[in-house]
Image (cartoon, grey):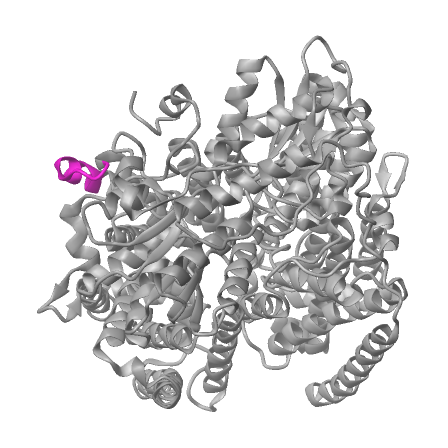
Amino acid sequence: MSAATVARPGPSLSSLVRGGGAVWVVVAVMVVWLSAVRGGGFWSTGNLAALLSGAVVLGLVALGQHIVVLTGGIDLSVGSMVTLTSLLTAVLINGYPIRTVPVVVAIVLIGALMGGINGSLVSIAGLPPFIVTLGMLYLVSGVALTVSPTPDGRVTSALTGFATSTFGPVPAPFLVLLASVVVIWALLTRTAWGRHVFAVGGDQHAARAVGIGTTSVLMRAYVVSGTLAGLAGVLLAARTAIGSPTAGTGLELSAITAVVIGGTSLLGGRGSLLGTMGGVALLSLITNSITLLQFPSTLTDLIRGLIIIAAVAVFVVKRKE
Amino acid sequence: MTDAPTTTTTTTTSRLSRLSSVLAPMAGLATVLLLAAVTTPQLYTPEVMRLVLFQIGIIGIAALGQTLVLLTGGIDLSISGAIALTSVVLAVTTNGSDDRLVTALVLSVVAGLTVGLVNGALVVLRGVPPFVATFASFVLIQGVIIAWTGGAPSGRIPDGLSWLGSGRLFDVIPVPVLVFGVLAVVVGVVLERSTAGRRLYATGLNRDAARLSGVRTGLVIGSCYVASSLLGVVAGLVNASFTGYVDAALVRSLNLDSIAAAVIGGIALTGGRGRIGNTLIGVVLLAVLLTWLIQLGAGGGAQLIVSGAVIVLAVFMQGRRLRIPGTTAGKKGQQ
Amino acid sequence: MTNIAFSRRGHSRTIATCLGVAALVAVAGCSTEQEGSAPQASAEDCLNADEAQAAYQSSWSSVAEAFELEDFQPTDEQVCQVDTATWKAEPKQGDSYRVAFAAQGPTNSWGVLSDEALRYHADELGVDVLYAAANGDATTQVDNIQQLASQNPDAMVVVPMGDGISGQVKAAVDQGIPVVLCSGVLPSSSGAVSTVTRQYDLLGSAYAEWIAKKLDGKGKVAILSGLAGVPTAEYQKAAAETTFEKYPDIEVVTTQYTEWSPTVAKTVAQNLIASYPDLDAIWSDSGYGALGVAQAYEEAGKPVPPITGDAINDFILATDGKDVQYALSTFPPEMSSTCLDTALGLVKGEPVLDKVYIDSPSFTDADGATYARKDCDGGLLVPSSAPEPLLTELKMCKA
């Protein structure tokens, strides 16, 4: 088993990929290219703010996905969790300023709770993560549609104000993402749980054999992913001001793509946070450049598809044959 | 895989586990049929039953391809891409006239082959996780369709094909379910009786061991992706000829339905475990369930909730079965 | 062992969390102060109101006439003229105006024609277009609008994908960019300067009234809406439901979604035939939905009940020469060229209305044959007022 997960000790490209540096090289090349072609437009404060705020929700979700993937699992339900939490944020607040703080806290907890459901099915019941979270994807989107089939609710001006406020070109929500990245980085590198995440992802049986409580490690990974999805839902609601039952559709696939092109192995146990954030940066840059460069609208999906498939083919860490 | 059972115990235990693997979905099917009898007795009218059969046909063909890929331990998220691509190829090449039907069919098969080969190459040669590889090709197919048709695929499907989607044998049995039946038998025979089938199971159970014993695992896995895409083409032909119009909207639900059907029936996501009978019963269960929900007048939200719950429940039952002492080795670790 | 210990701890933790969440929500529920929605523009300074109001009324009376409805009253709307002095400006860059266009994107034939009609008209007028596609998604569109606004265009045309973009539209307007909403509406809090659209209410209730007239106010009706959660579908459905409530003897037996797909519609209709063999009429918001329904009834060997939808060429051609009663109208994509005119009117200081209601032909099966276009693509909404050269260029019609 463990033999299968060991990467081929290989050329410098593969080590660069594993360290998460490769994707940043591509990001840097794209930035240089965009600066050369559309320098003024790209570096304008407004465009930078659009680029950064567009990355927040994806970034938070990819962060949670990163941890789950490190444990050797996958979380397909993050998109639907973002949908439900952002819808609930708007519906529960519904324009009452006094509700803002309690609802925001409650929503993040609801995210954690949904993560907990995923976690207990995966860790305690021992079900395959793919199918558990696929089921949750259906379930949670269904709940969102039941809460309201139409866009509904309204957040307060305090929240929308937060979403639009900026420090220089840096939008306030982006600082939330930065803070979350720092926290997760500390959790992964400075705590026993963080080390256990890597151990469990590398080889669950071996981890258990050396006395790691795999159940609790897995449980917490999914809870963290759910919490971050809840946080992303709140920020999404703050950005759009109104709840929508389809807001986060497809987010899980973008998040997984970001994690994979960041060099993290979907087999678990190996990956760098830096790489995943590079994946988020690359996906956000692609979206940004399509409008910036005014590509023909019918070609945008094709371009996106080609870039993703190329990135995936080049950046994926190979299994040992 | 030191815990692989020896050959002598395999025969008895595998028969036991094969039996128990269809028990849960059988029980589920019985429950749904009973509930339907109480709540919506009209489910048992010939018209609705025909509808169920049609659903079985269309979900089933896609689920067969999905099963092959799942048995290798992979997953195919691009089946719906192959389905959509087929209907666009048909419409654009023929625009409703029967003259160029043969050309269109050939081109559809070529399109399916290409999709399958790209998936296979990414998974086998580049070692890309199947989930990501097939999702990437799904996005690419969407991009190709939009770039090719200018964003709005439209046009007619030749009438010469309409028997495939809306024809009926003896005016009773919808043709799609017959197509599914024939294909299921073919796939079943290949899996159970041929060397290729044995190699497929061996590869799915333990790729390294299979390779050491001389199986060209890359070829086996690659062929499964190609077969899956080609079955997607067949599903696309059936789907397109059902209404006779290009239709890109239906597509994504078929992707998830095909996975759900196989999993509900008891095909293990870890590969190597499950037979065509599992897929068959999963397809029937899902088709009955979906039709029942529509008959109940359940809204989109409720339909999603029930589908989600059934998937989790089905896997939960599978998990229980695997824990029965002495039957199988229990949960398989990550590959 | 560890499992049991963990799950016990997990239980108490879960319960505590649940209680906490419940308490927080309860606290939130007790509060009463709601932030008011922005005050409506005051009525007294409504310029040129009569003429504007008449234009609005006519979009309702034309459909009433086409469907032969006797009592079809417009919903209350106040239309005023915009004070364009606020927005009059010289081009910010170079000699020609740059108009940003936050579009739906080419996700279907409606989106393609909406995009291309605006571009074509911009070419005619010598205006530059900054384009961004939302691909039908409101969240994407929020990013699009922010990015387009950062390029400092002279004006912006937005095809709204949902109320969620209101905040970003407001931000663009606050930045000094006049925003024209196109083919859709937003709450007045968005601050959009003008709205150019055909009314969803109008379509939804006109179809329902036609059905009520066909049935003499008595019978069983099924509602086939488009896609759950999408405003275009939900607003029309809501208007239909309100209309049917006026008729105590009309029973809406079921509401289903067709996803605007003939395949899904056909499956749904086959179910309907089995469950409700005595349906008297079907309210559908789309021609593709109606197409699937018609096929299902024909294959079952039953007469197609009176049905509604948008005027998709495919549907009219498919029912040609068959005994199908229908009422169709359109939500024309090519109205985007009017949106561009409105936006340019604002920056040029020409008189512009704050709500421009597009009128579009409505017709029934009696006139279907005159509207069908055999030389055109099946997905075209007929009659199309898009320029013929554009339709040919897009290969939607033969030259």
Up/down of A81 relative to C375, above or below: below
Decide: is A44 above or below C174.
above
Q: Nearer the viewer, residue B2 or A260?
A: A260
Left or right side of A177 for C301: left
Characterize the magenta stretch by its predominant secondary structure.
Answer: helix
Relative to the observer, which residue lies in front, C238 or B166? C238
Q: Residue at x 59, y 55 (%)?
A: A249
Q: Residue furthest left?
A: B170
Residue at screen point 50% across, 39% down: A305
| Residue closest to the far top | C95
The number of callouts visible is 0
A117, above or below A24, in the image = below
The stretch drawn in magenta includes residue A148: no
Apparent side of residue A227 relative to residue B90 in the rendered image (left or right) = right
Residue nearest the viewer, comparing C137 with B6: C137
Q: Position of residue B50 (x, y in %)?
A: 23, 72
Rendering quarter of residue C46: top right
Image: magenta residue range: B95-106
**Residue C319 seen in the current view:** yes
Q: Position of residue B297 (x, y in %)?
A: 44, 74
Provide residue C171's location: percent of width, then percent of height: 80, 38
- In the image, residue A60 sits, relative to residue B310, either above or below, namely above
Residue B101 among magenta residues: yes
Residue lying at 41% horizontally and 43% vertically, measured from the top left: C362
Residue B228 visible here: no
Q: Is residue A97 left or right of residue C255?
A: right
Residue B198: x %, y % from top left: 28, 67
Question: Which quadrant of the view contains residue B228?
Answer: bottom left
